[in-house]
Amino acid sequence: MRPLLSPRSVALIGASGRAGSLGRIVYENLLDAEFSGELFAVNPKHLKVLGRRSYPSIAAIEHTIDLAVICTPPDAVSTVIRDCAGRVHAAVVLTAAPSADAKAYHRWRENVTASARVAKVRMLGPASFGIARTAIGLNATAGAVAPLRGRLTLISQSGAVASALLDFAREACIGFASVAGLGVAADVDFGETLEFALADPETDGIVVYVETLRDARAFLSALRAAARVKPVIVLKSGRTAKGSAELRPAPDRVFEAALKRAGTVRVHTYTQLFAAAAILAAGRIPHGNQLTIVSNGRGPGLMAADRAADAGVALAELRDEARTALAALLPHERALENPVDIDSEATPSHFAAAVRVLLAEPHVDAVLCLHVATPAAPATDAARAVASVAHGAPKPVLAAWLGSVERTEARSALEAGGVVNFYTPENAVDAFSFLAAYRRNQEWLLEVPPPLPELGEPDIAAALRVRSRVLAESRTRLRADEARTLLAAFGIAASPCAVARSARGAQSAARRIGYPVALQSEDAGPGAAPYANLRNAAMVRRAFSQLRAAAQSDAAKRTVVVRADPSPSLAGALRIGVYTDAVFGPVVACGAATAAACELALMLPPLNRRLALDLIDVAIGNRLPPGAVDSLIALLLRVSAMVCSAPWLIELSLAPVLITAEEATVLSAIATIDRRRPVQPDGYRHMAIHPYPAELDTALKLKNGAELRVRPIRPEDAALERAFVAGLSDQSRYLRFMQHLQGLTPQMLARFTQVDYDRELALVALDGADGAQSIVAVARYVANWDRESAEFAIVVADAWHGRGLGYALMQMLIRCARKRGFTRLIGVVLGINAGMLALAAALGFVASRDTNDPEQVIVTLELGQRNA
């Protein structure tokens, strides 16, 4: 992505001197930004454009060009891109599609994309806003406002939104390292641009604007990878798209659930976006959700408290020691509550002392300082005083210097102490709420659930027999007895039920099951209310007749489901659901039995105990006793296992579900399957998040008899990974990392241990007993963006050289890559690394010199055809 997003040479194809034209707007932006690289204008009709030399074609330029910026008419775009073959590494197409019908538009876009593929040119766009890279003076955008230099990267699908964000950011003095407008994203999409921002040393935080997603798995995979190292803020439009209140959650709620699992923060307005970006980039993340507000005016403090209540932010309770210390600061006696009003007569030193007291409170996670300019506390003096206390503090200090938008000295004074000025109480509280959400979501990001919980192996064969029976009868909906069998295959208890085709049959079934019972039509949807609490045969007969009279189909008139109905216990009954979102795949839902789908709490699978507990907390709070919570967690984990193991199950509604300390019992289950989906999970591609591949945990026996445990790396292996790299010899570290490296930085450690198993795999070989293990070798691959190849690396502890460990571990990695569907493995090896080159040759890799670096060798292993 370097030639595209940080080019050393740029050719503007379609440069123009005509006022108002796209070619002139972009050319003027390029010239005004004073690009530090080589800049060429291309226009076959003019020898000069805006007084500078113009080339008739890209072929007329004597040099190979990193980036072509294309602003030609639509009909010329495909030809221009084909002309770039062998001369240009990447292109950004600002030209939009011609005004035409949908078929013509798709044909034009496909032609442009095909031309880029044939020319082997990576393309951003069409209809891109353009790109900017402030460190090199590059502004190849169609925007009216040039971005300020800063430490954020902006990735936006919409040019209009990107332009508005840059305008807003300039007023707020917020700068950017890079800006990338995806446009149609026919080639380069979110995944690659996020990956570039992740690796970019100029970028401290990432801001993303999303409208629609083409590949949810790739988006979420890249988002999770980026969020492990840098804060990511997402602004998404389209929140008004509706789901079915009864049948399924709205798509936007699923999107929000996906972002939480990705460790990112979701915002809804421009103001919130930059508030979140500014505070997250400051790098001080609170440990909890307890905020203390201090103000030299009662009104601003109350406004902040109101906003805190709306945003779910808790106001910390102050200890008596803090109250006493604060009372000594105030000129008048008053009640000291949170918000803390230190009075309009407070001086800058009073502000600083109050902030110092509040930061020392153990239950306070952050301090919000609100300032109104008074004769006793001038804005800049008060800012310097607060900044002096905040500087180096372990807890974040936020500020709102009311009325000081134009007072740059006050803002600069605050920033010198690591304090961000949000100008209004509401913005500051929103910023803290994003901090708290970021901390929680980062914890979720570290969770790596396996596909199957440790609750016993499911009976997959029994589940597949149910599937075969349903499909053999050309149905998609399971009957009540089939749904019960499917649940039993995954260890989920369901109450007895029976299908009746006559009133007498329903009465007989009710006697067997035991009164009271409930009756429901066989084809009733998840939101349909049954005839409940039927306590005798007469009630069953009347309910059966009423169901048959109201039935909408012949099948419904023939069959009625009879089930147990312990109605006195239903007040606390729950509803568990699985829904398949069109973008993110399956999502698990939980809530009260009477709740509509729009009211259920959501989480993307796979789940583990921690995630299930958090889902329960959001869904119902602390309504259940501890024993019952354990039963509900077990049920959710079994549902998660079902989702992972059965891609063909697209919808499941369990309601009502009774929860006791002994077990969770499903009273009614409705399930729908899709014959077009795979029978077995194929790389878990039906899910947005790849489970932890626990099936790869194995024992490796070496030729000398030594036995090591090999498994995929986990986030909790960070200490082991750090010790492993630190224990390598200087030469081994140099050969592995191709630089002199004493140890792993926190960013590298997170990147190496927090693996997204969809796109990468790291196998660790462990020596020693549980609790005292050490890593002695690591082999990993990371997918390239062609999704067909992966780059590998391996390093073995010095003491384990010569034992065949590297060869055996690489064999395992190759098998995993082949099973994952990659067609080749590629490695970059220093030419002096004779041991690695010999190992690669023994494994069948073919070596070739790196044309970009004569000191490096490229080794490649063809793995065969890509899996279908």
Image: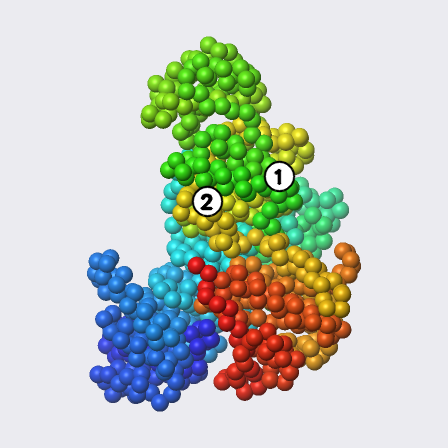
Q: Which residue lies furthest to the top in this view?
A: 538
**Residue in the image at 68% along x and 76% along y:** 733
Residue picked out by circle 1: 633
Visible residue check, residue 790: yes
- Which residue is the site of mark 2? 648
| x and y, in percent, of residue 711 in the image | 66, 59
Q: Which of the two marks, 1 or 2, is nearer to us in this view?
A: 2
Residue placed most toward the observer, 610 or 345 = 610
Name the residue nearer the viewer: 509 or 301: 509
Question: In this orientation, does residue 375 appear?
Answer: no
Is residue 333 rendered to the left or right of residue 230?
Answer: right
Are circles 1 and 2 on residues that touch, CB within 8 Å?
A: no
Residue at 29% x, 65% y is: 109
Tag 2: residue type? Answer: Trp
The kind of residue tagged 1 is Ile
Secondary element under disc 2, as helix, strand or loop, is loop
The location of residue 492, given as percent across then percent down, is 58, 35
